[in-house]
Image (cartoon, rainbow, N blue to C red):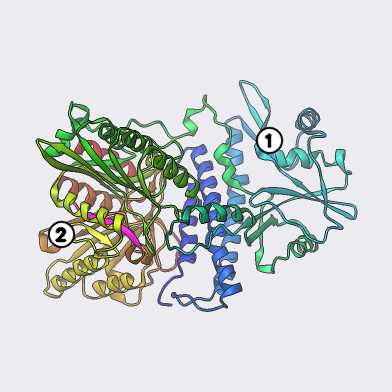
Amino acid sequence: MKYIDRDISWLSFNARVLQEVENLYLPLMERLKFAAIYSSNLEEFYRVRVAGHRFAQRYRGDLKNRYGYRPSFILQEINAIVGDQQEKLGRLFFEVLVPEMADEGIYFLHDELEQRDKTLVSNYYESHLKDQFSLVDITDLSMIDLKNQAIYLYILSENRKYLLEMDYEKWGRFITIYKDDQETRIIQLDDIFRYNAAKFLNASSEVYAVKISRDAELYIEEEQDIDIVRKIKKSLKKRETGLPSRLLFNENIPFKHINALRKKMKLDMTSLIPGGQYHSFYDFFKFPFFEDKSHLYHPEFQAIPCKRLDASADWFAEVKKSDLFLSFPYQDFRYVTRFLRLAAEDQEVLEINITLYRVNDSSEICQALELAAQKGKKVFVLAEVLARFDEISNIYWGERLEKAGAKVKYGIKKLKVHAKTFAIHRRENNQEVTYAYLGTGNLNEKTARLYADHGILTADKRYTNDLREVFSFMKKATDKPILNHLLVAPFVLRDKINCLLDNEIEIAKSGDKAEAFIKINSLEDLQMIDKIREAADSGVKINMVVRGICCYYPQTPEQGRNIKIVSVVDRFLEHTRIYHFYNGGNPKTYQASADLMTRNLSNRIEVGFPVWDTTAQQLLLDQINHQLSDGIKGRINDNVNNNQYVTGANEKTSQEMMFELVKKMNP
């Protein structure tokens, strides 16, 4: 084996998410939330990645991918791994979480009910559900077409088979049937119907849950043209009717019955994925919140103030004085949104250029841009409409900003725009000064509270002159940008990382200390993996924090000794990208929007930027070192994917340590 397949590796990441369900360092309801995160991740995985393998197998032949695996093998492996994980999820939920909730007076009812609960459930059915639903008799139907992601009860009654759609939007999923000062008794909607089946069919009815997940890929050629928005709007409607990627079913259902359902849906056998009694655990994001039990949740934290901005009456002057390093969610993202709002209202601001990849529905960023356009400022927006599952929001804001007078461009031919940046051009003393934001995460207020990212506000010409070149390219998509400092993909980022690693290799060969620290979300590009192997074989110490996909597989003893890869799964989604090279004692540090994935390095506009401030450099290096030694939330990302915890005696997690680092930087 030379490489691990990216999707098999991703399943190892989701296994780390599942580990958090049993991590006693977490409060109980936060562990329940990780069960929801695991399920949500898996749902998207089947709708995108598994669906892609099925599509390739059906329409392109069972050909090996670039990692050396055929779709048939990958699908078989996925089903086996997911089957084990789903079994573990069910066991953790029913044998660990449910009893612990009961200890807190929160009773999640399932299986055999006490008589008083049966009475409560019967009364609820009579008063809320009776005569409010319809059964679909499928025995004589030749075909069945289930709604995407909807849960159905598959009911076997005598010689008939029925489907009953669970309308959670209408009825809710988690039903509180009793509550007083001592206890709360909750049951799922599915079980209310299950326990009352004799009332609408007969006492011998068997009830099982099933769910279909469909292909979420739009299959639009990624060549932007004047009709791209229309094409996407049209294609989005097909998401609900796409090729099925899995039929999830209660594992206790007799095979002949689930096989009969499969045939009526014209699915192949590999589409069958056994699960527990309940599906769509991601609905537990909506589980009732218990205000009187704060110990069951993470304590609220106070964002660390940026004292320089808080104390300043003129933010432009403050940024012009020296760069401002910001770290989210440890600091409030509204420093960024407010800076844009000030620019929109400032009479001296002439123009704002910005990239938008994933936009919040009620985006304060876009509201500021809208105001700027309404006030007559030039506003250029590169809105990436091919950001999966955010297409609707991105198109909505793109069209709204166009109406306000902004110039909106929906992507670039053959390139996605994944950069996270904006530039503000302001008139000062008859000269034009450019202010910029460069970040690792999306310009999205909602995810900035959940994702751990860094960014800088700057007026440094070394940044802003290059950024002018980048926006000029995005507007015209003709001349290659001339860059002196920024590492922009697909133009120079890959080559620069290679050069930095080559430099460490030469230093190692001379017998001196050679070391690289890299923090990314995914390591997938085969050329970069091979370059990292070459560096390790030459004696370079490679220290990596790779949250998710990691296709690296060691080939030599030197690689095993010199490459350390850790993955951290914690309260916030690790999202920062950091590249730090020892460089013979004169460190070079970069942040970027890009991971070491082929799509980031070769097929997207990404912006990496040097960190010159030594205090910020040290914070980034300390952050990586804390994560490499995080014995509470860090797992060894090795070639066997067993997710063993890092050996460490930390009393705090690396994210808790980050609060202290950011506080220290903002005395």
Query: What residue is shown at x 53% (from left), y 58% (from top)?
Result: 45
The region drawn magenta spans 604-610
Q: Secondary structure at mark 2?
A: loop
Q: Is residue 272 above or below residue 472?
A: below
For the C terminus, give its image quadrant: top left
Query: Which residue in the protein does label 1 denote?
Result: 170
- Counting residues from the start of the chain, the first of labels 1 and 2 encountered is 1
Give the residue pinned by disc 2: 484
Q: Is residue 12 left or right of residue 143?
A: left
Query: Toward which corner of the image does residue 598 lie, by quadrant?
Result: bottom left
Q: Quadrant of residue 145?
A: bottom right
Q: Is residue 169 above or below residue 439?
A: above
Q: Is residue 557 left or right of residue 276?
A: left
Query: Picture coordinates of residue 310 (x, y %)?
Result: 22, 28
User: Residue 182 in magenta?
Assistant: no
Q: Position of residue 246 (x, y in %)?
A: 64, 60
Q: Nearer the viewer, residue 429 or 4?
A: 429
